[in-house]
Image: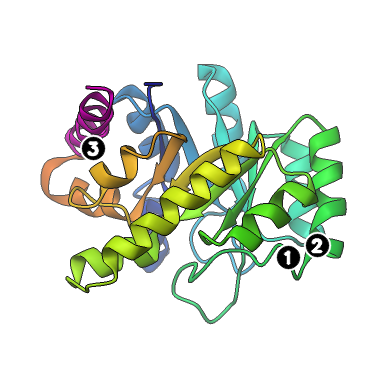
Amino acid sequence: MTRLRLGVNIDHVATVRNARGEGYPDPVRAAEMALAAGADGITAHLREDRRHISDADIDALAVITRRRGRPLNFEMAVTTEMEAIALAHRPHAACLVPERREEVTTEGGLDVARGHNTIAPVVQRLVQAGIRVSAFIDADPVQVAAAKAAGVQVIELHTGAYCEAVREKRPQAQALLRNLKAAAAQAAELGLEVHAGHGIDYETVKPIAAIPELMELNIGHFLIGEAIFIGLGPAIARMRALMDEARATRAA
C-alpha cells in the first residue's frame, strides 16, 4: 500500500504567540522542526481575521518550504483577497475551506454543490497558476461529485465528526467511518486524490489511515497540544508510526 503522507498544520503555534502579542513561539520555527521530524509538508490557514497565522508567516513559510523542497498547503477561504495571496505566493497546494468569523475552528466542509458558481472560477485560476487545488468537504457523495465538477484535483475529507464521536464513545462512530470510506472510494473512482484531516489524534488515526484511497493526512491541533508534553518531534514521530502501522496492517 502507498505510503501515507503527513502534513503538519502549525496554525496553533501562532494562536499561542498571538495570545500575548509576542514574537514567540514562532510558527515558522515550528514548521522547520516539523519537517526535520519527518513531516512531509506544512499546512497553514490564513484566516480573514488573521486570528493565528499572519501574512508575514505565509511569506516566511513559502520561502522555507520552497528551500527545503517540501510542499506548503495554503488553506484559504474562497475570497478575492485570499485568491490574490495564493496567486502571489503560488504554494504547492491551496485547500479551499469554509470560514465564518464566529467559529472557533472550521466546523464542517465546504458546500461545493451550492457554491459551484463562485468556487469553480477560483479553482480554474489557481490551477492555471500551477497550484494544486483541493476542497475540504464532508463525506457526502453530493459534495464529492460537486468537487469533481468544480475542477479540483484533490478532496480533503472532514474527519472531525468521526473523531469526536470516537472520543465521546457515541454509537454512530462506525457509521461515520463507513461514510468516510465510501466518500474516499467515490473520489478515487472519479480520479481525485484523497486527503483527510480535522480532529485526528492517536486514538483515531489508525482507522482513518487504513482507508486505502487516502494519500495524505493533515493534522495540527492535536500535535501542537501533545508537543507541550513530549515535544514536537516525538509527537510527530509517534503519529507517523501509528500511520505506518495502520498501512502495514491493512497491507497484510
How dense is the environment of label 1, judged by Cα within 10 Å: few (below 14), some, or many (20 and up)?
Answer: some
**Predominant SS along the magenta part:** helix
Q: Who's the residue at 53% across and 27% down the image? A: 64
Residue 231 seen from this side: yes
Q: Of the two numbered discs 3 and 2 on the same chain, state the one appearing first in sequence.
A: 2
Q: Who's the residue at 38% across and 28% down the image? A: 4
Residue 1 position within the rendered picture, expressed as x and y whole percent measured from the top left? 37, 21
Q: Which residue is mark 3?
A: 239
Question: Where is the C terminus found, in terms of image quarters?
Answer: top left
Q: Is residue 9 left or right of residue 226?
A: right
Q: Who's the residue at 19% across and 50% down the image? A: 226
Q: Quadrant of residue 34?
A: top left
Q: Is residue 79 left or right of residue 190?
A: right
Q: Is residue 45 above or below residue 134?
A: below
Residue most toward the bottom? 102
Q: Of the two numbered discs 1 and 3 on the same chain, state the one appearing first in sequence.
A: 1
Residue 68 position within the rendered picture, expressed as x and y whole percent measured from the top left? 50, 18
Proximity of marks 3 and 2: CB atoms separated by less than 8 Å = no
Q: Secondary structure at mark 2?
A: helix
C-alpha gap between disc 3 and disc 2? 35 Å
Proximity of marks 2 and 1: CB atoms separated by less than 8 Å = yes
How dense is the environment of label 3, judged by Cα within 10 Å: few (below 14), some, or many (20 and up)?
Answer: many
Proximity of marks 1 and 3: CB atoms separated by less than 8 Å = no
C-alpha gap between disc 2 and disc 1? 5 Å
Which numbered dot is residue 116? 2
Q: Nearer the viewer, residue 83 or 165?
A: 165
Q: Is residue 153 left or right of residue 31?
A: right
Magenta residues (range) = 233-252
Q: Which residue is mark 1?
A: 113
Q: Amino acid at mark 3?
A: Met
Residue 22 seen from this side: no
Residue 118 position within the rendered picture, expressed as x and y whole percent measured from the top left? 84, 63
